[in-house]
């Protein structure tokens, strides 16, 4: 009996040491009392914005296929046991370059779950040699949960995107650089326009249902060259999760099908999809499953865009302004329960440490904000009001080359849901924090 008691004491002691080493209590210090908040507010007050009016506006676009192979795993819904079985529909990198003679910007999206940080690390220096500073490179992704992985490192990266695949990282990075080069070469004098279409019947709040806030708007930027060739850049907030995990084929989901429909219509020579405020939003059920569901959503959205194109007017502008603000965050708080979280060093080992920030890009009266997260559509409205009061059109996108999980309204921080607990990595108060940064960028870019 004494021996058994000793064993139990040793066992309990080991568990206690492990618990102390791996776990700690959640920190709910008010945001005003934190260093990270003060640092970012200081950066906002000293914000440097590049660009202004130029001699005219040139625009160009291009797309490049992302090559896959037999070792390509799918990123989305967590770890897959096997590589992708085949390619259902092709995946691409798409780039738009705008240049007013004083400032040029590259807007890049890819048919991937996110814009992978390891890819972005390689692309930024390469585009820097072409004259694009970090503030003038605007990344996003379509957020399809059925596309190529292999672009992340570490245990969490493997769980999210499959085994690290250097060949895939190089393939995506190379496609981005080639696409930007071709877009720049193809640039010609152009006009631009903006349009919002209510696509609320195709989207719903996946956290709290139809009674909760949604971001129903399909936002469209049109670029029209002097030769009448035209392109549209789209954002929408519905999560591309139509194709289930059980289907192990690569697909761009409804965003890829949507832009393909628009390009095949003959009305637009190019289309690109940037994931909007996809946090908390999902597609509305349409009675179909998997690819049929994605195809129907894509067809409905394409018809809405094509039907409404007569009211999408373009005009001349030469105004381009851009900036990039680094974000200092709360130390990681990956919670196991309401009050217990893993220690920051464990989180950093699992996820890897990142330096993240937020993009702001103004094109005419449009203000684009790129966030490093799944930004919740429930947070969009208040910032949109700030922009509207200034006479500006606000477009918020997710996945700008960093990734810090989900940013959701603060009042739901203690809700036991995936978005608000397991994937809210740097809370609490991040809804307000990110909202204030976005509002500050809108005010700075709108003047």
Image (spheres, rainbow, N blue to C red):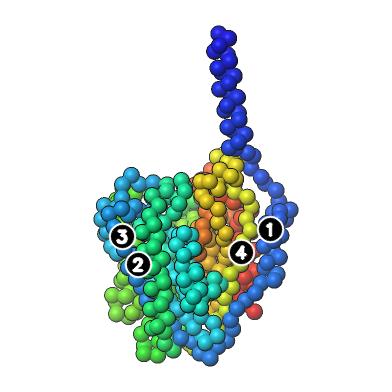
Name the residue at 35% across, 67% down.
92
Between 374 and 149, which is closer to the camera in this rendering?
Answer: 149
Q: Position of residue 271 (x, y in %)?
A: 37, 74
Query: Pointer 2: what residue?
Result: 92
Q: Nearer the viewer, mark 2 or mark 3?
A: 3
Q: Work out how far the residue at label 4 is from the one at label 2, CA to CA, in angstroms.
A: 28 Å
- Say which label, 1 or 2, has the lower sequence index: 1
- What residue sits right under mark 4 in the picture? 326
Residue 37's mark? 1
Residue 58 horizontal side relative to residue 269, left or right:
right
Query: In the picture shown, does residue 425 fall above or below 444?
Result: above
In the visual, does 198 lie left or right of 270? right
Please provide percent x and percent y for residue 42.
71, 65
Q: Residue at x 55, y 11 (%)?
A: 3
Within 10 angstroms of label 4, few (less than 14), some, or many (20 or more) residues? some
The answer to whether 319 appears left or right of 308 in the picture is: right
The kind of secondary structure element at disc 3 is loop
- Marks 3/1: CA distance? 42 Å
Q: Position of residue 230 (x, y in %)?
A: 38, 82
Q: Residues within 10 Å of mark 1 (few under 14, many from 20)?
A: some
Say which element carries label 2.
strand
Give the crowd class for mark 3: few <14, some 14-19, many >=20 residues within 10 Å. many
Q: Earlier in the sequence, mark 3 or mark 1?
A: 1
- Relative to 14, say whether 363 is above or below: below
The numbered disc on residue 68 is 3
Residue 434: assigned label: none
Question: How far is mark 1 from mark 2, CA to CA?
Answer: 37 Å
In terms of depth relative to the viewer, which is nearer, 374 or 312? Answer: 374
Question: Which residue lies at the image location 57% right of the left edge and 28% below the top edge?
Answer: 15
- Quadrant in the rendering for residue 185: bottom left
| Vertical placement of residue 211 versus 133, above or below | above
| Element marked by disc 4 | strand
């Amino acid at each position: 009996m004494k021996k058994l008691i000793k064993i139990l004491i040793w066992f309990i002691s080991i568990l206690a040491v492990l618990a102390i080493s791996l776990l700690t209590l959640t920190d709910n210090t008010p945001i005003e009392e934190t260093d990270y908040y003060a640092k970012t507010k200081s950066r906002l007050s000293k914000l440097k914005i590049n660009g202004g009016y130029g001699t005219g506006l040139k625009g160009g676009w291009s797309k490049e296929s992302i090559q896959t192979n037999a070792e390509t795993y799918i990123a989305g819904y967590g770890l897959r046991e096997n590589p992708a079985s085949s390619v259902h529909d092709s995946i691409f990198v798409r780039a738009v370059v705008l240049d007013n003679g004083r400032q040029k910007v590259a807007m890049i999206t890819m048919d991937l779950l996110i814009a992978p940080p390891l890819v972005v690390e390689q692309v930024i220096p390469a585009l820097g040699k072409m004259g694009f500073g970090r503030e003038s490179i605007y990344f996003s992704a379509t957020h399809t949960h059925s596309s190529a992985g292999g672009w992340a490192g570490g245990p969490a990266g493997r769980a999210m995107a499959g085994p690290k695949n250097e060949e895939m990282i190089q393939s995506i990075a190379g496609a981005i650089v080639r696409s930007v080069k071709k877009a720049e070469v193809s640039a010609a004098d152009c006009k631009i326009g903006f349009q919002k279409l209510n696509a609320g019947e195709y989207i719903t709040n996946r956290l709290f249902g139809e009674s909760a806030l949604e971001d129903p708007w399909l936002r469209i930027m049109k670029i029209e060259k002097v030769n009448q060739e035209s392109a549209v850049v789209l954002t929408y907030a519905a999560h591309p999760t139509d194709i289930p995990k059980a289907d192990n084929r690569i697909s761009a989901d409804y965003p890829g099908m949507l832009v393909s429909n628009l390009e095949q219509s003959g009305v637009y020579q190019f289309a690109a999809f940037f994931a909007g405020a996809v946090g908390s939003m999902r597609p509305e059920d349409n009675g179909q499953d998997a690819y049929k569901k994605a195809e129907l959503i894509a067809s409905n959205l394409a018809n809405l865009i094509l039907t409404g194109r007569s009211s999408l007017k373009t005009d001349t502008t030469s105004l381009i302004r851009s900036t990039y603000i680094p974000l200092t965050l709360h130390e990681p708080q990956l919670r196991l329960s309401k009050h217990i979280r893993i220690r920051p060093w464990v989180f950093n080992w699992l996820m890897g440490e990142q330096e993240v920030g937020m993009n702001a890009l103004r094109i005419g009266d449009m203000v684009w904000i790129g966030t490093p997260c799944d930004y919740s559509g429930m947070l969009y409205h208040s910032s949109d009001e700030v922009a509207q009061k200034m006479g500006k059109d606000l477009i918020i996108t997710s996945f700008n080359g960093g990734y810090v999980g989900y940013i959701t309204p603060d009042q739901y921080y203690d809700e036991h849901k995936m978005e608000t607990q397991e994937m809210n990595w740097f809370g609490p108060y991040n809804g307000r924090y990110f909202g204030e940064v976005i509002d500050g960028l809108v005010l700075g870019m709108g003047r």
